[in-house]
Amino acid sequence: MIEAHELTKRYGDKTAVDGLGFVVRPGTVTGFLGPNGAGKSTTMRMIVGLDAPTSGSVTVNGKRYAQHSAPLQEVGALLEAKSIHPGRSAYHHINALALSHGIPRRRVEEVIELTGLQSVARKRAGAFSLGMGQRLGIAAALLGDPATVMLDEPVNGLDPEGVLWIRNLLTGLAAEGRTVFVSSHLMSEMALVADHLIVVGRGRLLADTTVKDLVRAAGGDTVRVATADPARLREVLAGPGVEITGEAGTEELQVVGMTARAIGYKAAEHGIPLFELSDRTVSLEQAFMDLTRDAVEYHGTIGIDTTGKAA
Ligand SMILES: Nc1ncnc2c1ncn2[C@@H]1O[C@H](COP(=O)(O)OP(=O)(O)OP(=O)(O)O)[C@@H](O)[C@H]1O
């Protein structure tokens, strides 16, 4: 479990993290999302004590990282900046970490196998591809068999097989009851792997929600329906929890609170012909862009609207 309370980090007059409060719970994968420069890496560095908060606090399993007597066994982290000696082999690197943290040698073999590095374990880490480097970082993170696993952009540089491997690894770690906190810019990947999301923008909390609720809030459960008699259709669909909108003079209505199937049945029951009946699907990417539009620090020169088209 990770708990942040009023967590703030300033670098000079730049506030990278601004009063963040959230809880990352065990047994699920929690995605950490935000535009570039939103403060994700800074937050993750503070979680593992690589940066000190200017104010506020963050704890892992109830204690600050530095207060744990065996921190590697509490939280395993893969952060962006890697500090692997390029001349060392993967095996040597993991083994040195294990030796300095009192972790048995058999665990070294285990994590090398778990991360699929057996065939390259004796090669120089400096010659590793980006994907192999990521696997090595993950092997180091899992070495202490930690209850909390935190990975910053783990799919970065991985090929499709590697992406699938990470997906299964993360869901597997969560199924074992671990706390899994993972940042990524790949929304489609997050939609597949994360149950819960913490979204930040300009260092502040924008959302602490489930993937489902975020998509729903962006209009993901709206059904579009077209008919020659929208006024009558409105009447027959009206009911508790049903919200119907539509511009005057058009044949189209947007319905929230009823499935397309239920609308179809209701219209048929009342003999109202429909021309169109479709779920409006909103991707996590669109929902994310809606949510963070005002918090994006670095805009490109071509605007992107939420349908993904250049504006
Ligand atoms: N050591 C530092 N000194 C000064 N400013 C910093 C430092 N580290 C981060 N920042 C600034 O703090 C802000 C948050 O940066 P951070 O790297 O935490 O964001 P991020 O969400 O991880 O971004 P990205 O998605 O691009 O990795 C940025 O504006 C960044 O320039």
Image (cartoon, helix red, strand yellow):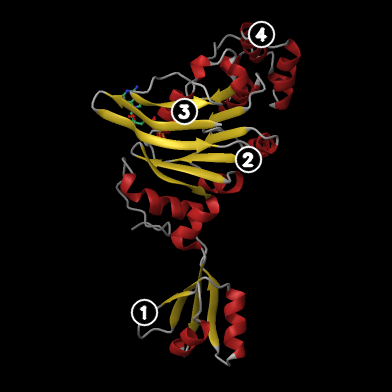
**Disc 1, SS:** loop
Q: Amino acid at mark 3?
A: Met
Question: Which of marks 4 and 3 precedes in the sequence?
Answer: 3
Residue at the image position 46 percent from the left and 28 percent from the top: 44
Marks 1 and 2 close (CB-CB < 8 Å): no
Cα distance in 3D space between marks 1 and 3: 46 Å
Question: Which of marks 4 and 2 precedes in the sequence?
Answer: 4
Q: Is residue 293 visible?
A: yes
Name above or below for residue 127 compared with residue 168. above
Question: Which of marks 1 and 4 precedes in the sequence?
Answer: 4
Marks 3 and 4 close (CB-CB < 8 Å): no
Residue 126: x and y in percent read: 56, 15
Q: Amino acid at mark 4?
A: Gly
Q: Residue furthest bottom?
A: 271
Marks 2 and 4 close (CB-CB < 8 Å): no
Does mark 3 have its CB less than 8 Å from ligand 1? yes
